[in-house]
Amino acid sequence: MSKTAALNPSCQLVVIGAGPAGLAAATTAAKLGVDTVLLDEQPAPGGQIYRAITETPVTKRSILGMDYWHGAELVTAFRSSGARHVPGTTVWSVTREGEIGFSVGGAARLIEAERIILATGAQERPFPIPGWTLPGVMTAGAAQILLKASGMVAEGRVVLAGTGPLLWLLAAQYLRAGGRIVTVLDTTPPANRRAALPYLPNFLGSDYLGAGIALLREVKARVPVIGDVRSLRLLGENRVREVVYQSGTAPERRIGADLVLLHQGVVPNLNLANAIGCRQEWHEDQLCFVPVIDAWGTSSIERVAIAGDGAGIAGARIAAERGRLAALEAAHRLGRIDAYRRDAEAVAPRRAITRFDKGRRFIDLMYRPRAEHRVPQGDTLACRCEEITAQQIVEAVKLGSTGPNQMKSLLRCGMGPCQGRLCGLTITELIASARGVSPADVGYFRLRPPIKPITLAELASLPKSEAAVQAVVRG
Amino acid sequence: MFRRLPEPAVAPVSITIDGMPVEAREGDSVAAALLAAGHARCRSSSVSDAPRGPYCMMGVCFDCLVEIDGAANRQACMVRVAPGMRVATQDGRRELRA
Ligand code: FES
C-alpha cells in the first residue's frame, strides 16, 4: 500500500486535504502545468465523504449509494494529473510566508509553497448533551467511516438521534447493509419548517430534492421515527445503556440502547485557516464560523485560498467545483494562464455551483439544530478533553471572562489534546448565550501552531539542510 | 456492538489488545479493530478517570487515545493496524499535553 514520493523542499502549489475540493483543485492545477503537491492525513484519497473510495470492502454499490461512488471519478482524474500525493501526512503548521510543517511516517518535514489551497473539509457539529462522553456514544459520521473503511455495521440496540441529511443517509445505508435500527429520534425543531418555507420554491429545483425524499421514505418505511425530540440525555455507567428524551410536550420516555449515534449537521474545519490568521465571520444560518473569501476562494491572506466545505458547508459537488476555481486562480497568479483563460474555464464550475446550490438555504434553515442541544447546561461537559462543564463556563463569564481565549487561560478548556477542535463552537455559543450577545461578538479560540500534537522525535528528525529535505518520503 | 459485512474476504491482520490476540482486517484503523472486538471503551479520562471511547473516528475528538507498540496517546482512529501490533487501553492521567 505504501507509496513513495520524492519531495522537493519547495513547489508552486500545496493543496491540503484529499476530499472532493482538494482532489479537484490538485487535478486542475497540475493539468495546467502547476507544480502541485497534495498533502493528506488519510492513507488513501477521498476525504471523509468519499472515505476509502479506492479500497472500501463494501463492494455492493447500492449500500453506500451513487453519491458516494461519484468520488471514484475524482480520484481517477487526480491520479493521471501529474500532481504528487503524499498520504498519511499530518500538517501541524502553515505560515503566511508559505512554509508548511508536516509529519509523515514519523518524521517531520518542511515544504515551501508559493500558493496554498486549504481543503480541510468539515467535521460534525458537537452534540453536548448529558452522557455524550460515554463509550457507545458516537457520531453518525463515525459510524459511516466504520462502514466505508471497514465494512462494519452497528448491531444490538442501535438508536440514531439528531437532525440533518447525514443522519438519514446513514440510516438508509445501514438498512441496505442489513442493519437494524431501534428508532430514529428526530430532534429537528418543528418551527424550522416555518423559517425554511420561503426558500422551498428554490429547493424544488434542486438535484437533492428527489434523492432526499426517497431517503426519508426508505427509512421511515422500516424504522419508527419519533419527531420533535428534545431534552435528550444518555445514561450508563461504563457505557451507554439508556436514552431519555421528550417528544413535544409528551412526558419523558426512556429506551434501552447499546449504541447511540448522534448527528446535528457539519461545520467547517477551520483549524489551519484559523492558525494562519485567515479572517472568519459568523454564519447565522449555519450557526458556525466561516472564512472570509473572494469569488476564487482566496482568503484574507493573499497566498492562501480555501475551498470545499472548509469554506462554508455546501456539499461534495460544490466542494469539487470550488476546488477547481481556487486552482484556476492559483494557476493564473503563478503565471500559467492569463485572466481570460481563467475566466473562460471558470464558467462551467460556476454554473455547476449555481445548480447544486439550489435549496441550500432551505436545508440550512430546515436542519438548524436546537439551541438546547448546542448550548449545554449545568454539569454537562462542554470541553471533553479537560472535562469542563457548562456551569464552569457560565460562572467564568460572570467573573468577567468574556471570550474563548480568556476561558482557555482560566479553565484550560481548549487546551487539551484536541486544542478546541471539538469544543470550540460550544464554548463560543455558551459564552454568547451567557452574555446575551451574538457568537459573532464572542469570536473563536485563537489557535497557534503546532495545531496537531507533534512528538519530540518527529521534531528532532526535521532536516537541517535542503538536501536532507529531498529525502524520499514514505506515505 | 458492530459486526462486519460478510461481503468480500479482506485479509486478516493479527494484533493484540491488552495482551489478548485479536484478528483485525487490513485497512482497519486501530479504533475500528477495538470496536470490532467489542471494546467501546479504550481509555479513562485524565481528570475524572471516566470511561471514554472513540467518538468521531476522524481525528477531531482525541477520545480514542491508546498505547500502540509502547507509545502512549496515539489516536487510534488515525493509525492503521499492522501485523503484530500491540494495542493497550490507557488509564487516567497519562494524558498528552500539547
Ligand atoms: S475517535 Fe475522535 S479522534 Fe479518534
Image (cartoon, rainbow, N blue to C red):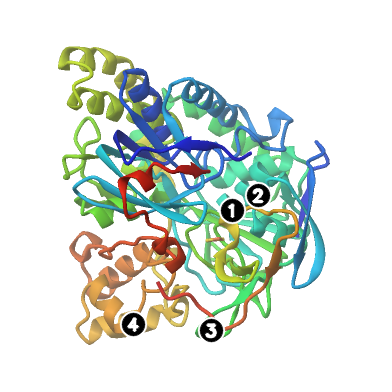
Image x and y of residue A210, in percent: 54, 26
Q: Chain of mark 3?
A: B
Front residue (pair A389, A86):
A86
Alpha-carbon distance for marks 3 and 1?
Answer: 26 Å
Q: Chain of mark 2?
A: A
Residue type pointed to by label 1? Ala
Alpha-carbon distance for marks 4 and 2?
Answer: 34 Å
Quadrant of image for the N terminus of chain B: bottom right
Q: Quadrant of ligand 1?
A: bottom right
> Mark 2 near mark 1, Cβ–Cβ under 8 Å?
yes
Q: Secondary structure at mark 4?
A: helix
Between circles 3 and 4, the one closer to the viewer is 3
Which residue has dot 2 on it? Answer: A146
Alpha-carbon distance for marks 4 and 1?
Answer: 29 Å
Residue B79 visible from this viewpoint = yes
Which tag, 4 or 1, sits closer to the chain's start?
Answer: 1
Residue type pointed to by label 2? Leu
Which residue has dot 3 on it? Answer: B93
Which residue shows up at 21% across the image and 16% down it?
Answer: A337
Label 4: few (<14), some or many (≥20) within 10 Å?
Answer: some
